[in-house]
Image: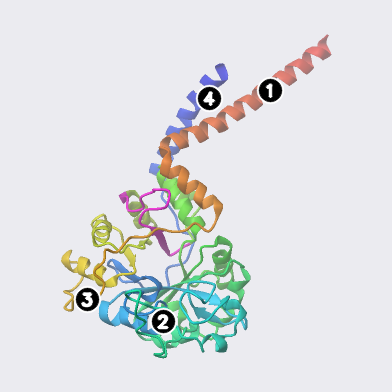
Amino acid sequence: MGVCCHSITISLCLMIIILSLNWYLPPLKATKPNPVHLPKGRLLVSHRGGVYYYPENTIEAMKDSHERFNVDMIETDIQMTADNNFIIIHDDFLDRTTNGKGNASDYTLSEIQQLDAGYRYSPDGKTFPFRGKGLKIPSLQNVYESFINSGLKFSIEMKNEDPKVADVLVQHLKTMPKAKEFICFSSGWHKVIERFRLLTNNEFCTVASEHEVIQLMASVSLGIPRLYYHFFPLKAHIIQAPFTSVGGVNFNDKKFQVIAKELGVKLVLFTINNGYDIANCLSNGCQGVMTDRPDIAIRVMELMGLRKPFKESYQKFDKEAETTSWDCTEFSCLVIDTLIGILPTQVIFFILIFVLVFLAISFLSIVKWLFCHSTKRKVD
């Protein structure tokens, strides 16, 4: 009973000290200034290059998002081919979006670019307006050459889990001298993005990995983000997080916006397709919206005075658009996300401190008893 009482008292004192330090110590960044000069206002990011008016991740979709809806950034994905080239595609298999079958990694770039990237696209589930129209899966080089002078920024995710993908990518980037001026790179796998940062000496813009987003979630939810980032500085230039996580954590909470501002990074929330959710995000101060529906987002931003009037009206899709969350790639992400979504975080914080203190006191008590018992036996 005495151990429990002492543990509770010490835990409360430690909690007060930790929260006080969080108020006093500033958060830090461990990276160089962002080489990609982002707009000062709210970012409008088109998910997968734009998926509603053109087949996703095609050059045509990206140009449409940029020219019609004036998006600031394109979010897209790269997979590695059999001959160590990079193609713009979300899935590691070809079946969902093309007339091909199997894994992209089993084909060469030349073979993949023979496929029809518009084959599966259907706005109504019945017609296929882009079949046979010459749409191809672009390579990373195609994207670089198409948008190098456009002013459009890119967020490109490495989908491969093997850190060696970063080595191959860095070699490709040597042939793209201006890439660091308009492309940010990301990976859901922390080991991949860390490898990329190491190889490039942090000279490229990088997006927070899933692991780093979980760190943000945990530190903010526990009430110690400033303290955490003081001792573990942020390495990313941009944070992309779900509007609401699968565990129920609300990244649209102003606490997340505050720490992002203190860190000097933009917090971009995804994938927000519902007009009400977009308005909610922007009114709450989020610095970026990633969406499948830039047509909806730009209308909302216009109404809120965040963009110039949008002259054209596009009502091609009149069904309700749904906001989607993330799929955790690592088991630890799912566990932490679920726990924080269910339990009061300050209670979790106190329990963690209490358990550590209780174990420490118990250990010291056992050591003390053994020492005293040993000394007594020697005296006897």
Q: Which label's residue is closer to the chain start, 4 or 1? A: 4
Q: Which residue is mark 4?
A: 7
Distance CA(mark 1)–CA(mark 2): 66 Å
Estimate the x, y position of residue 149 in percent, counting from the top left: 37, 86
Amino acid of disc 1: Ile
Seen in the image, is 51 located left or right of residue 164?
A: left
Estimate the x, y position of residue 359 in percent, counting from the top left: 60, 29
Estimate the x, y position of residue 248 in percent, counting from the top left: 39, 48
In this orientation, does residue 276 appear? yes
- Residue at x 55%, y 62% (from the top left corner): 189
Q: Which residue is mark 3?
A: 314
Q: Which label's residue is closer to the chain start, 1 or 2? A: 2
Magenta stretch in the rendered image: 236-254
10 Å crowding of disc 4: few (<14), some (14-19), many (20+): many
Amino acid of disc 2: Thr
Q: Which label's residue is closer to the chain start, 3 or 1? A: 3
Distance CA(mark 3)–CA(mark 4): 62 Å
Amino acid of disc 4: Ser
Q: Which label's residue is closer to the chain start, 2 or 3? A: 2
